[in-house]
Image (spheres, rainbow, N blue to C red):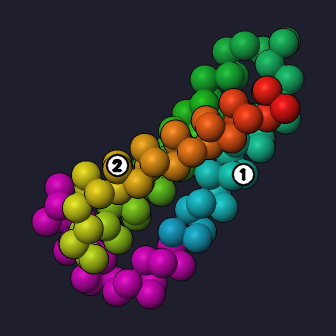
Amino acid sequence: MKDELLQIINHYGIEHQQRKLEEEVFELQQAITKFENTDFGKWEDKKYIFTKDIIEELADVEVLLNQIQNYYQIDGQKIIDVMQFKVDRQLGRIENEIHS
């Protein structure tokens, strides 16, 4: 998939795909907000439809993030390492809040 992602970003350009990422993140936020503001008590079957919207928007964001990662030749393990650092740091903050 790496080659296909590079083909897409090279065709449209980094600036265009950056704007596309902003758009897709906004659409993801809209899908989450719509889901959170919906009362599923009377129609549990519709819950799947809204969850499907979130999944589709997450996929769009991930595709664009992966395009950018590949465009800048960023090692995925480095991203995972920074993510782990940030998660650990936040958990430390939560622990401090609990004991304060």
**Residue sitting at 79 percent across and 34 percent down?**
97
Task: Estimate how packed mark 1 is, as few (under 14), some (14 to 19) or many (20 or more) residues with alpha carbons within 10 Å.
Answer: some
Residue 30 image label: 1
Which of the 4 image quadrants contains residue 66?
bottom left
Q: Is residue 95 above or below residue 43?
A: below
Q: Is residue 56 magenta?
A: no
**Residue sitting at 41 percent across and 54 percent down?**
82
Q: Position of residue 34 (x, y in %)?
A: 77, 41
Residue 80 image label: 2
Q: Is residue 2 above or below residue 85?
A: below
Q: Nearer the viewer, residue 85 or 38?
A: 85
**Residue sitting at 69 percent across and 52 percent down?**
29
Which of the 4 image quadrants contains residue 100?
top right
Residue range corresponding to the magenta coloring = 1-20
Tell me the distance, in whole angstroms, between the alpha carbons under discs 2 and 1: 27 Å
Judged from the image, the secondary structure of the residue bearing numbered disc 2 is helix
Sequence-first tag of 2 and 1:
1
Q: The N terminus lies in which quarter of the figure? A: bottom left
Q: Is residue 39 above or below residue 77?
A: above
Judged from the image, the secondary structure of the residue bearing numbered disc 1 is helix
Left or right of 38, for residue 59: left
